Image (cartoon, rainbow, N blue to C red):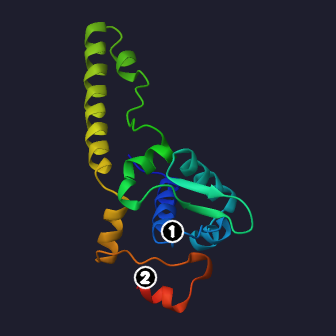
């Protein structure tokens, strides 16, 4: 399984918002400029994060995006679900049934066996990333107990030093 570019961008957006001063939303322009790439595509990702309940959107001149929850309450699985949907790595397109069509009981058993393996693998992977929060990633990144907060809209030299 390979995660999409959209998931990585979504995780980065959430991390960026987790380091933003809580009372100031980050403008979509700043997010787009910081991450690079298509503003339209990033807006679609941010919309998915809003619909997923992970970030909020405020319109207007002082508007932008903020976390909807604290970083310790946002798991990587939630980011995955918001951007990718449910974890389902095995497409089960019926090749086992087709290949063993002359042996229907074997075809059904083979299809069930491989499907079961991937469902269990999906569950294990999901269980693992469900226990990893944005806060965990930030702690591992910054190696401090208190995550530094900055204003990404008006990044200063002092803010840059806080993040370094």
User: From this viewpoint, is residue 56 visible?
Assistant: yes
Residue occupying image coordinates x 30% and y 14%: 107
Q: Nearer the viewer, residue 6 or 150?
A: 150
Q: Nearer the viewer, residue 67 or 77?
A: 67
In x, y percent, where is residue 49? 54, 51
Labelled disc at residue 22: 1
User: Quick check: marks 1 and 2 in contact, CB under 8 Å?
Assistant: no
The residue lying furthest to the bottom in this view is 157
The residue lying furthest to the front in this view is 23
Q: Is residue 24 left or right of residue 16?
A: right
Is 83 placed above or below 36 here?
above
Q: Which residue is mark 2?
A: 163
Q: Is residue 129 left or right of residue 61?
A: left
**Mark closer to the chain start, 1 or 2:** 1
Q: Residues within 10 Å of mark 1 (few under 14, many from 20)?
A: some
Q: Is residue 105 left or right of residue 17?
A: left
Residue occupying image coordinates x 51% and y 68%: 22
In x, y percent, where is residue 58? 66, 58
């Amino acid at each position: 399984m390979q995660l999409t570019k959209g998931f990585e961008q979504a995780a980065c957006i959430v991390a960026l918002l987790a380091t933003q001063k809580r009372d100031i939303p980050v403008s979509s322009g700043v997010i787009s400029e910081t991450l690079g790439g298509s503003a339209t595509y990033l807006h679609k990702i941010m919309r998915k994060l809003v619909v997923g309940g992970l970030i909020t959107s405020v319109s207007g001149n002082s508007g932008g995006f903020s976390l909807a929850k604290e970083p310790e309450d946002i798991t990587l699985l939630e980011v995955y679900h918001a951007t990718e949907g449910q974890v389902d790595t095995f497409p089960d397109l019926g090749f086992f049934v087709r290949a063993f069509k002359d042996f229907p009981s074997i075809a059904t058993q083979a299809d069930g066996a491989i499907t079961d393996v991937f469902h269990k693998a999906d569950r294990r992977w999901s269980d693992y990333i469900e226990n990893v929060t944005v806060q965990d990633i930030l702690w591992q990144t910054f190696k401090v107990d208190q995550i530094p907060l900055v204003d990404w809209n008006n990044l200063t030299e002092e803010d840059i030093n806080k993040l370094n």
